[in-house]
Amino acid sequence: MKITMKINLLKSLVLASALGIIPSGLAQTNLPTLSGARITFAEPDFDFGKVDSGTPVKHDFVFTNTGDQVLEVTGVRPGCGCTTAGDWDKKVEPGKTGKIPIQFNSSGYGGQVHKTVFVTCNDSTRSNLTLNLQGTIWKVFDVTPMYAIFNLTSEEQTNQIQVVKIVNNDEQPATLTDPASNNQAFTTELKTVREGKEFELRVTVNSSQISGNISGTITVKTSSPKMPEISFTAFAMLQPLLTVNPPQFTLPGGPLPGEARYAVTIQNNSTNLLVLSEPVINLPGADVQLKETQTGRTFSLSVNFPAGFQAQPGQTIEAVVKSSLSKIPLIKVPVIQPLPPPAVHSTSSVAPPSPGAVSPVALQK
């Protein structure tokens, strides 16, 4: 009975060591020694509990070399910029322990968070490992969503509104005042949902003031000394009514050795469904096809180019398809192909000397 228990315990220890985990309550000196370098973490997952936003979270991940050769930790790479690694133990002798110090900057975070750290080492069975850091970040005010994002098209001339919810998590009630934006394209309006506890901030973007992509910082003053100001970012992205990707048919230098088919995707970004029809191309021998892949939204325009095709200097070739959009009645996709290099011809030749002529070398003599 005792022999069986010892065998099962040894099996459990070997399995736990292979997984990189030291079972709690067992001394590290009781771990079996394995062949080669072996990395075994006492705690690969760390829950830091609940901390205030802005409080740095620090933790040392401790590991043991349970092998019989020197363990080399070659790399420690956090999953994002808010998490950093300190100077870790890079070489650990058999039976010895090392540590990987990790720090997480909780500023700007709220609610549940999960961060990962990727570790590489010379353990042949587990050369790539993942450490996990998780917990809850407490903020005086929760802002949802953290960004106000507007996706617009050039056909829209009306204002769009995004509602941002602000919740006071403190026991003390708070007041919010003076919402403002540093970009005139965004205007704000503050509404109280539950006195001292819940608020709505309505952010409006004026599409007539947008060209391309813009952003702005929205700020609100609060009565809380713990967080006297709330700020977040608003983004507005103006998309064209249609996008063609890639914007042209680009062929390799010719003449083409055989028939070749190339395609572009036409994406409808407008609010109305799109109808495309009558695809043509001004290239004899070429075949053009139009396929609707998502009703009214996405299309594929493909052209089968004939063998031996080579664009000529100054030649304009384009595929054209009719569109139901009044602002873009025709969609034109040009065909681009580099010209072949010019033939190299010798412009100078040396005529053989005529009979009786005296060469320069002979004159020098």
Image (spheres, grey):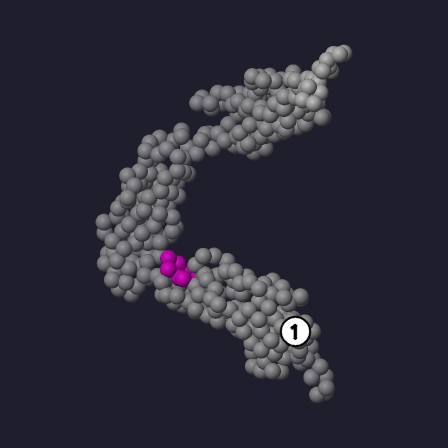
Question: Is residue 110 in the magenta section?
Answer: yes
The residue at the point 45 percent across, 61 percent down is: 83
**How many numbered circles are shown?**
1
Q: Work out which quarter of the rendered image holds the N terminus and state it.
A: bottom right
The residue at the point 28 percent across, 59 percent down is: 227
From the viewer's side, name the closer residue of 151 and 344.
Answer: 344
Q: Work out which quarter of the rendered image holds the C terminus and state it.
A: top right
**In this image, 308 relative to 108: left or right?**
right
User: Which residue is situated farthest in the top direction here?
Assistant: 355
In the rendered view, tell whether residue 208 sits above or below residue 352.
below
Q: Position of residue 150 (x, y in %)?
A: 39, 40
The residue at the point 52 percent across, 60 percent down is: 77
Q: Position of residue 345 (x, y in %)?
A: 66, 19
For residue 169, which quarter of the picture? bottom left
User: Which residue is situated farthest in the right direction here?
Assistant: 355
The residue at the point 61 percent across, 78 percent down is: 95
Q: Position of residue 131 (x, y in %)?
A: 54, 65
User: Which residue is situated farthest in the bottom direction here?
Assistant: 2
In the rendered view, tell whether residue 316 sits above or below residue 47.
above
From the viewer's side, name the closer residue of 311 and 165.
Answer: 311
Q: Which residues are magenta?
A: 105-112
**In this image, 10 relative to 99: left or right?**
right
In the rendered view, tell whether residue 229 sits above or below residue 13.
above
Mark 1, residue position: 69
For residue 307, which quarter of the picture? top right
Mark 1 residue type: Gln
